[in-house]
Image (tube, rainbow, N blue to C red):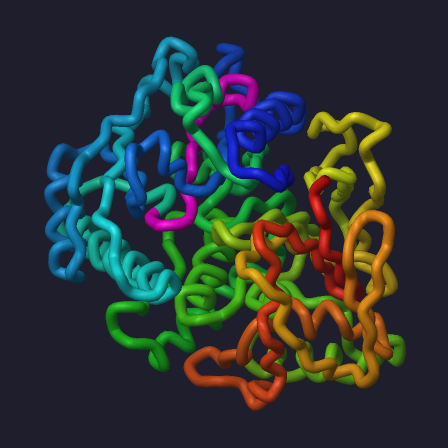
Amino acid sequence: MGFVSTPELGHYAVELGARALARLAHRGGLDADGKSGDGAGLLIQVPSRLLGGDFAVACVFEWDERALTLIAHAMRDAGMQVLEWRRVPVDASSLGERARETMPGIWHGLIARSDEDADRWESRLYRARRAAERQASASGVRMYFPSCSSRTLVYKGLMAGTRLADFYLDLQDPDCESRLAVFHQRYSTNTMPDWRLAQPFRLLAHNGEINTVGANRAWMRAREAELEPELREVVWPEGSDSASLDNALELLVRRGWEVSEALMSLVPDAWEGRGDLAPAVRDFYRYQSTKFEPWDGPAALAFSDGVVVGAALDRNGLRPLRWARTRQGMVAAASEAGVVTMEPSEVVERGRLPACVRTVRIAVLRTLQGTQRASAPNVCGGGSEFRGSNGIGVAGGDARCEGIRLCTLGALPGFMGRSPYSAIQPSRIAYRTRLAVSWTFSFFISRPR
């Protein structure tokens, strides 16, 4: 698993993601037919050129012909309109026999653009999807949403990584454009292979195990009384441990959290009893520990909400994750080195993501827009701008605090309300068509040449 992001919008990121997935095929389970796998997939930005316009997309797996009508009604009840149902072009002959036997109908519901704020629209899409899922469950309609978003689109299925681009013909189309791709090849351990359980999920891809998942699910259920009735039953009962973590992460993001903050709260660093963490970092983890118990276990995670893409490890660093950056601004992270093609002479930085807080822990790539750089208060005290041969960076009096400051692009909400740390509200760092790479304890602006 891993991610790749390119400085320009185009087909290259999709191509690199599919190629990386094929190179990781040995990491996944494979059926005796040589084609059916435990699951593989790509998460990309919504490809507007391919779809012929700027739409939100409800990607649907349906095993019941009533599903599409039910979803259209749920969207209409939420004040949105499904303009068209697009049957996703696929090549079923690329699948193994077992995958074909359980293959759903695969559809893209193109939802009319909303004039409201993008984050608010994402929240409405989330609530409409949850309403459709409840209605489907009550009516006995078997269906599943791999994604439902104005920002991201997931292509996944019950195949080996080498077969994903053969099956989904969209991934071969040059008009399928994205700046990022999160990829995952599944090796099923605690659940049987299933089209719905292939990864990535709606926000993340997870390699590993959540050993505390039983308690985590129970705590999520216990806190549901604090949520509006339409948002309860957050955790999908048929899901894997990875799916449950994605459910919890998605709830927080759709309620206003920045995705990297939410993941740092659910899968925290080892912060207790440590004197080498900046006070602001330690206080962040201490406060969030009152809201959530850690989702613990050996884990490598790649995540994206369509604006941010990044990677993280569990607090013990028990899964491998290597990253590299080119001078042009392409960034990639994966469970193995070399799965994303990079010309060695163009690589300016590379390393591994350990759990050790003295080095990189969460890598975040943000596509930023704007014409001027806004001012950003330095919660660490001090601070200066420096210029290097490859870009512009920001350094504070204590560099270990910078990532929290720069990743925190707004108040930190609690489970229901807002955090007392709402004073930490730096302005957005904005550059026109620049890519910003930040990690927990440092920050860098890459300037494509």
Q: Whole-percent x and y of residue 128?
A: 24, 58
Q: Whole-percent x and y of residue 91?
A: 36, 14
| Residue 233 visible, this angle | no
Q: Quadrant of the C terminus?
A: top right
- Which residue corresponds to the image point at 62% horizontal and 72% vertical from the top-left? 374
Left or right position of 338 against 120:
right
Q: Which residue is nearer to you in this view: 173 or 152?
A: 173
- Check the image and name the residue furthest to the front: 371
Q: Which residue is nearer to you in this view: 127 or 256?
A: 256
Q: Is residue 154 above or below residue 233?
A: above
| Residue 184 visible, this angle | yes
Residue numbers of the magenta segment: 148-164
Left or right position of 32 against 329:
left
Q: Whole-percent x and y of residue 53?
A: 29, 39
- Which residue corresponds to the image point at 79% horizontal and 57% vertical from the top-left? 360
**Total count of labels:** 0
- Which residue corresponds to the image point at 76% horizontal and 41% vertical from the top-left? 325
- Which residue corresponds to the image point at 59% horizontal and 83% vertical from the top-left? 290
Verify whether residue 151 appears in magenta. yes
